[in-house]
Image: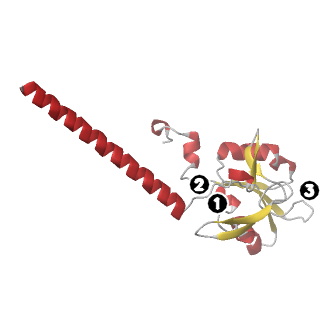
Amino acid sequence: MTSNAEDARKRNRVFLAITFVGTFLVCLLIIEVAIRIIDPQSDLRKKDLFFQYEPFIGFEGIPDKKGTFANSYFNTTVIHNNEGFRDVDHSKKDTQNKFRMIVLGDSFTWGHGVENDQIYMKVLEEYDQNIETINMGGPGGDPQEELKVYTSRGVDYEHDVVLVGFFIGNDIEAYYPEPKKTPP
């Protein structure tokens, strides 16, 4: 009889543990859904909003695309040029005799959450009228994709320097995804 009582207690503990874990997971699911409804996060690459898939580069801007990008924190107008970059159209040749920079990077360089004229390289152009910047940044980019953008598009433009917007928060992970393989 003792073993029957012990078996019943074990079954009861297993049932309680499964019930607890199941309830916990359902609560997490409800919280996740609530957060997605209350404060949705944007993914600019969904639904062809501003980007399209390109086999070599990955996602690239849709040429001449103009639209509104908004969430609960900002509401901005996005304008892509004739090559799909968030910038004005640029001549491949340096016709203005300015110091020309090609700027590569991720969403910071693309200008996530700000108007086109508020992107950091455009602020630099306002500061020094002898500088022309060519924004080739894109959201979600990493250094490998930026190199692909440069080799497939950037080299076509006359330029003096390449500026890479490097975000230490995730660009290092692109090269060192495993914790044991981090740089010294």
* Picture residue at 12% right of the left edge, 30% below the top: 6
Q: Is residue 33 visible?
A: yes
Closer to the camera in the image, 117 or 44? 44
Position of residue 184 relative to residue 113, above or below, is above
Dot 1 crowding, Cα within 10 Å, few <14, some 14–19, many 20+: many
Please name the amino acid that badge 1 sits on.
Phe
Q: Helix or strand or loop: what does disc 2 sit on?
A: loop
Name the N-terminal-most of marks 2 and 1.
1
Q: Are marks 2 and 1 in contact (CB under 8 Å)?
A: yes
Please name the amino acid that badge 3 sits on.
Lys
Closer to the camera in the image, 155 or 144? 144
Q: Which residue is mark 3?
A: 93
Give percent across and percent down for residue 19: 30, 43
Q: Which residue is mark 1?
A: 108
* Picture residue at 69% right of the left edge, 69% below the top: 76
- Give residue 98's quadrant in the image: bottom right
Closer to the camera in the image, 118 or 80? 80
Please name the amino acid that badge 2 sits on.
Phe
Name the N-terminal-most of marks 3 and 1.
3
Q: Please state the total of marks drawn on the protein image.
A: 3
Q: Nearer the viewer, mark 2 or mark 1?
A: 1
The dot on residue 167 is 2
The dot on residue 53 is none
